[in-house]
Amino acid sequence: MITGPADETPEERDELASEYVLGTLSAELRSEVQQRLRDDAELRTAVDTWERRLLGLTDLVEPTTPTAHLWPRVERSVAALEPRPLQPAAQPSSWWNLLPLWRALAGAGLTATLLLGALLLTQTTVKPTYLVVLVGPQDKAPGWVIQASNPREIQLIPLGVVEVPADKALEFWTKAEGWQGPVSLGLVKPGQTLSIPLDKLPPLVPDQLFELTLENPNGSPIGKPTGPIQFIGRAVKVI
């Protein structure tokens, strides 16, 4: 029987499960996890939990038929991976290995965004209930991730450093359905992680809009966005 190390903590087991679901483990370590899954009930539970949690991220994309040239490339890439492991009898197939899902992600062109957002989930002790991936409106490149472990506070995390003109600033906005207009969450410095309380706003809801716009150094003078949108995204409930 293959079980986990005697000194493995629940946090370490959870991190291992998340990396297994995301497919970021080395081939050797992934093989070890696959053997452990046959007999390690706690690890199976952790893997199941991560699969259910990340399944909500598929709401970020809409099924789209890929081009005639794109899908054969995806199939060849999948075929080149290691042979599909035997699953424990009580476990369903992992959603991460479902070909229809990969068809949708490939056609939508947001696989990288999904991965970046999901990887952020593995780096927090308290699992977020909402996730937002902010992307550039032109190239759809992810620039920031928003995560919330409760509906009253969010964390804005940069995925890199963006250049902002010296005479401009990034202003953070949000708007949910039914609101009269967007509400400013303050100015944001490029590359800075921020925790922002939402105590004066209604609780977060799925599909809530978030965006960063380019404004004057002191922010918008009229209380609503005036400059071009730099990054934009909508909230997805993940647990």
Image (tube, rainbow, N blue to C red):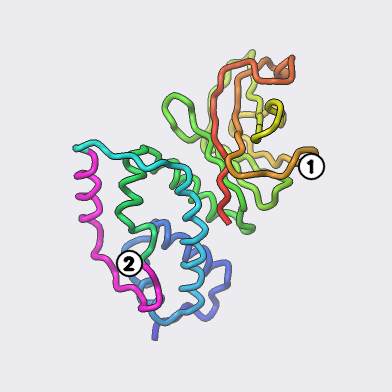
Circle 1 residues within 10 Å: few <14, some 14–19, many ≥20: few
Which amino acid does the dot numbered 1 rest on? Answer: Asp
The mark found on residue 185 in the picture is none
Out of 172 and 91, give the one closest to the viewer.
Answer: 91
Question: What is the residue that sits farthest to the front in this orientation?
Answer: 178
Out of 98 and 155, give the one closest to the viewer.
Answer: 98
Q: Which residues are magenta?
A: 70-92
Name the residue that disc number 1 marks.
199
Q: Earlier in the sequence, mark 2 or mark 1?
A: 2
Q: CA distance from mark 2 to mark 1?
A: 47 Å
Relative to 140, residue 110 above or below: below
State the image coordinates of residue 212 (x, y, percent, origin top left): 60, 27
Out of 6 and 56, give the one closest to the viewer.
Answer: 56
**Residue at 69%, 20% in the rendered image:** 224
Relative to 27, residue 235 above or below: above
Which amino acid does the dot numbered 2 rest on? Answer: Glu
Query: In the picture provided, is 127 more to the left or to the right than 115?
Result: right
Query: In the picture provided, is 143 more to the left or to the right than 84?
Result: right
**Residue at 65%, 48% in the rendered image:** 148
Quadrant location, the C terminus: bottom right
Name the residue that disc number 2 marks.
28
Quarter occupied by residue 22: bottom left
State the image coordinates of residue 150 (x, y, percent, origin top left): 69, 51
Q: Please, what secondary structure does the residue beneath circle 2 have?
A: helix
Relative to 13, residue 19 above or below: above
Query: In the picture provided, is 148 more to the left or to the right than 134?
Result: right
